């Protein structure tokens, strides 16, 4: 499959002209699309893509790849101030916004390998700018199997971030239509719309899926393929998805903006086999250094753009993901982020490890563990918990604490358990964390 530009790659995919990109209120087929092109002034230049809608952004990305020298893809929650700082950092020579979507095509510049610049998420302050190419973004995407023509993708992600962009490219380069969510669309409405569109392959974070499983309209969808990424996929959410979709293939994947698509886990178990680290793999290498996962592959970003950033790769080409893992038997389990550790009197607590235990308690749908300042030990562990349905608070609290005491060291057991109606998510669909 050609990788020179997205437009060329799509032209080589059988049936791609009939592919539809389906938004909340708009549907566009690629054979009817009037692609975004900001005019001849964008040929060979560095462009900041700042569109309000995913559909507009999708058409602009198709048009600008192979035309612009560098395309900076801005997520919808990026402030104008940050956008301007990033534009200066990357040497932007123009901003493509909604007013320029759908203007007349300019002569396409030949043989340009466009740099795709994506922004990191989950950080405070101005995001880091990470440089990819179409080749690194699509290295993990396999050609469509013969006869595999009836797939319709759907995603909770926004395609202007790495996870969503992967699904966008996977759908289009497979010749499949894609149903996009909307940031302001209630979960019930999206599930109903996805079901009406016949979505067969649906992707999101574990938090997205927990919200979907709590929805009364979960029965509106019947996906054949369920994919989770972006957060730790613990056993309770995997088991709940198996119950909800008994005929679906359920996969959780590891990927990040910097390291690219790392690996898929297909056995419906939390964590990943130790063999992924110990034995040669196709397309990637992994190792664990001081408890942190390091990945090397042709799917990783090339580097950071901007002065003052540490090198993305080490001398051997590995990317330090910052995700901490722990080996138990013949399997590694994710326990949290290096920067998210709670310090309880000098002892370390990974919030995600405690959350996995709490989420395993019957009657719990979702939890979030945080630090609370304490004058004696510096911090204590507290937990906010969303129940799966009607419950008796005292009994569920005791079940949570009993399970935590049985499975965790004493300093990891929550001192305070609070029941809440829901938990805030970031624009990327992950739990919004305030410590670390």
Image (cartoon, grey):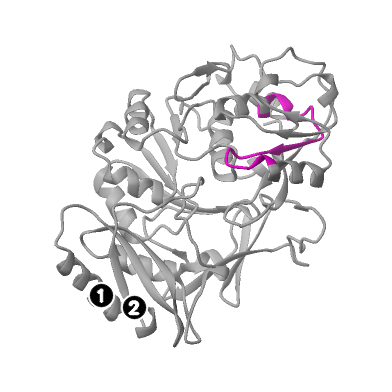
Q: Between 146 and 247, which is closer to the camera in this rendering?
A: 247
Task: Based on the picture, tell me whether residue 283 belongs to the magenta stretch.
Answer: no
Circle 1 Cα neighbour tier, 10 Å, few/some/many (<14 / 14–19 / ≥20):
some
Q: What residue is shown with label 1?
A: 401
Residue 63's tag is: none
From the top left corner, tell me how far across and down residue 341 is, in percent.
51, 73
* Between 125 and 290, the one nearer to me in the picture: 125
In what element is the residue under mark 2?
loop
Q: Is residue 359 left or right of residue 161?
A: left
From what the image shows, is residue 260 above or below residue 318?
above
Whole-number angstrom distance, CA of label 1 to CA of label 2:
7 Å
* Residue 72 part of the magenta-drawn span: yes
Asked if 22 appears above or below 260 in the picture, the reply is above
Give the position of the C terminus as an image quadrant.
bottom right
Please state the horizontal and vertical placement of residue 423, each as a whole percent of the image.
37, 54
Of all residues, the one furthest to the front in this rendering is 375
- Count every numbered label the image shows and give the total: 2
Quadrant of the snapshot with the N terminus = top right
Query: Which residue: 35% across, 84% down?
Result: 410
**For the magenta stretch, what is the residue range?**
61-80
According to the picture, the residue beneath numbered tag 2 turns out to be 413
Question: Crowding near pointer 2: few (<14 within 10 Å), some, many (20+)?
Answer: many
């Amino acid at each position: 499959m050609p990788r020179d530009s997205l437009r060329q790659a799509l032209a080589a995919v059988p049936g791609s002209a009939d592919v539809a990109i389906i938004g909340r209120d708009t549907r566009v087929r690629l054979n009817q699309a009037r692609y975004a092109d900001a005019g001849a002034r964008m040929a060979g230049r560095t462009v900041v893509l700042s569109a309000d809608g995913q559909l507009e952004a999708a058409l602009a990305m198709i048009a600008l790849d192979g035309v612009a020298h560098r395309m900076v893809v801005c997520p919808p929650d990026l402030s104008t101030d940050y956008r301007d700082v990033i534009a200066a950092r990357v040497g932007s020579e123009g901003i493509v916004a909604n007013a320029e979507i759908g203007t007349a095509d300019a002569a396409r510049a030949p043989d340009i390998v466009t740099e795709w610049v994506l922004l990191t998420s989950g950080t405070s302050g101005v995001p880091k700018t990470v440089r990819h190419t179409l080749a690194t973004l699509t290295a993990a995407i396999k050609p469509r199997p013969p006869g595999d023509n009836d797939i319709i993708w759907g995603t909770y992600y926004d395609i202007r971030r790495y996870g969503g962009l992967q699904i966008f490219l996977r759908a289009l380069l497979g010749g499949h239509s894609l149903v996009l969510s909307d940031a302001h669309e209630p979960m019930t409405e999206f599930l109903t719309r996805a079901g009406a569109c016949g979505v067969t392959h649906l992707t999101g974070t574990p938090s997205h899926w927990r919200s979907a499983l709590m929805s009364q309209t979960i029965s509106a969808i019947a996906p054949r393929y369920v994919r989770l990424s972006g957060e730790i996929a613990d056993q309770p959410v995997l088991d709940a998805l198996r119950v909800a979709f008994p005929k679906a293939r359920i996969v959780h994947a590891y990927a990040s903006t910097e390291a690219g698509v790392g690996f898929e886990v297909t056995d419906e178990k939390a964590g990943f086999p130790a063999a992924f680290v110990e034995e040669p793999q196709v397309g990637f290498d992994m190792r664990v250094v001081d408890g942190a996962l390091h990945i090397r592959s042709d799917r990783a970003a090339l580097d950071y753009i901007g002065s003052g950033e540490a090198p993305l790769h080490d001398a051997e080409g590995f990317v330090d993901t910052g995700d901490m893992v722990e080996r138990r038997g013949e399997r590694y389990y994710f326990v949290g982020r290096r920067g998210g550790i709670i310090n309880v009197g000098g002892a370390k607590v990974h919030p995600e490890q405690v959350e996995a235990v709490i989420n395993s308690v019957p009657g719990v749908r979702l939890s979030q563990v945080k630090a609370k300042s304490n004058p004696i030990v510096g911090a204590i562990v507290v937990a906010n918990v969303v129940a799966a349905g009607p419950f008796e608070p005292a009994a569920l609290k005791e079940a949570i604490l009993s399970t935590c005491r049985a499975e965790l060291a004493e300093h990891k057991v929550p001192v305070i358990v609070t029941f809440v109606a829901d938990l805030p998510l970031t624009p990327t669909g992950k739990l919004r964390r305030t410590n670390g």
